Amino acid sequence: MKIFIDTANLKEIREAAALGLLDGVTTNPSLVSKESGVSFKQLLQQIVESVDGPISAEVISTDYEGILKEGRELAKIHSNIVVKVPLIKEGLKAVKTFSEEGIKTNVTLCFSASQAVLAAKAGASYISPFVGRLDDISMNGMDLISQIVQIYRNYDFSTEVLVASIRHPLHFVDACMIGADVCTMPFSVIDKLFNHPLTDLGLEKFLSDSKKISQ
Ligand code: E4P
């Protein structure tokens, strides 16, 4: 299971990277819009210098030519940049072209298994199903992950399943159980993965008992 952080905040990215367990970063226009005082390209440059792994950067064009132009520019920034493309017809056409050009892609805003199949056929490097947003509308996001993982196995698709819109540690555990490839999470969720009250209690007791040991 690869762990990506879902943020454009450099402080959080560097803090997560310092944990030694971070494999990559995903951003989106909403996350980038929260970071002020720096251009998108400068921000990406700083992110690629902070993490040696796939960094998803999303295009905002919605037509084939526009997506290609933007994506090629983003890909030029660094070989670790993954061009994030929305799951629309023009987007998948562009993904096919990017895949022929050797540009890595992350197809985002996936909410159904049929969409995920089309993304894989177009040659996407990653598919991003949004589990939290499905849960929000009373649909089970994890059922979608199970379907996609099973379908990709059935047809031996190489597209990696990147579980997105993760809201809590149970999403992460469920994704691991299903066998998804990647989970992208906000820093707050990554932080929670470490915690267990019995670990804290146990450590407290070990440390207090250790004071009774003669050195
Ligand atoms: C995925 O790459 C998206 O950036 C993200 O996971 C969306 O999550 P949200 O539903 O919490 O906005």
Image (cartoon, rainbow, N blue to C red):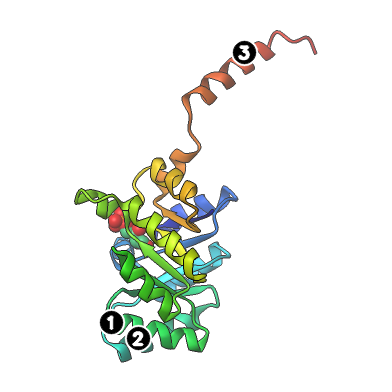
Q: Are marks 2 and 3 in contact (CB under 8 Å)?
A: no
Q: Nearer the viewer, residue 17 or 109?
A: 109
Q: Quick one: label 2, few (<14), some, or many (20+) residues within 10 Å? A: some
Work out whether mark 1 precedes mark 3 in sequence or the reverse, and give the earlier one: 1
Q: Secondary structure at mark 3?
A: helix
Q: Nearer the viewer, residue 87 or 51?
A: 87
Q: Quick one: label 1, few (<14), some, or many (20+) residues within 10 Å? A: some
Q: Secondary structure at mark 1?
A: helix
User: For residue 93, which numbered disc appears in the image?
Assistant: 2
Q: Residue at x 34, y 47 (%)?
A: 167
Q: Amino acid at mark 3?
A: Ser
Q: Residue at x 34, y 52 (%)?
A: 143
Q: Are marks 2 and 1 in contact (CB under 8 Å)?
A: yes
Residue 193: x, y in percent? 47, 40
Q: Which residue is mark 3?
A: 208
User: For residue 42, which numbered disc appears in the image?
Assistant: none
Q: Quick one: label 3, few (<14), some, or many (20+) residues within 10 Å? A: few
Work out whether mark 2 precedes mark 3 in sequence or the reverse, and give the earlier one: 2
Q: CA distance from mark 2 to mark 1?
A: 6 Å
Q: Amino acid at mark 1?
A: Lys
Residue 84 in sight in this render: no
Quarter of the figure with residue 61: bottom left
Q: Residue at x 50, y 89 (%)?
A: 101
The answer to whether 208 appears left or right of 75 in the picture is: right
The answer to whether 23 appears left or right of 98 in the picture is: right
Query: Farthest right residue?
Result: 215
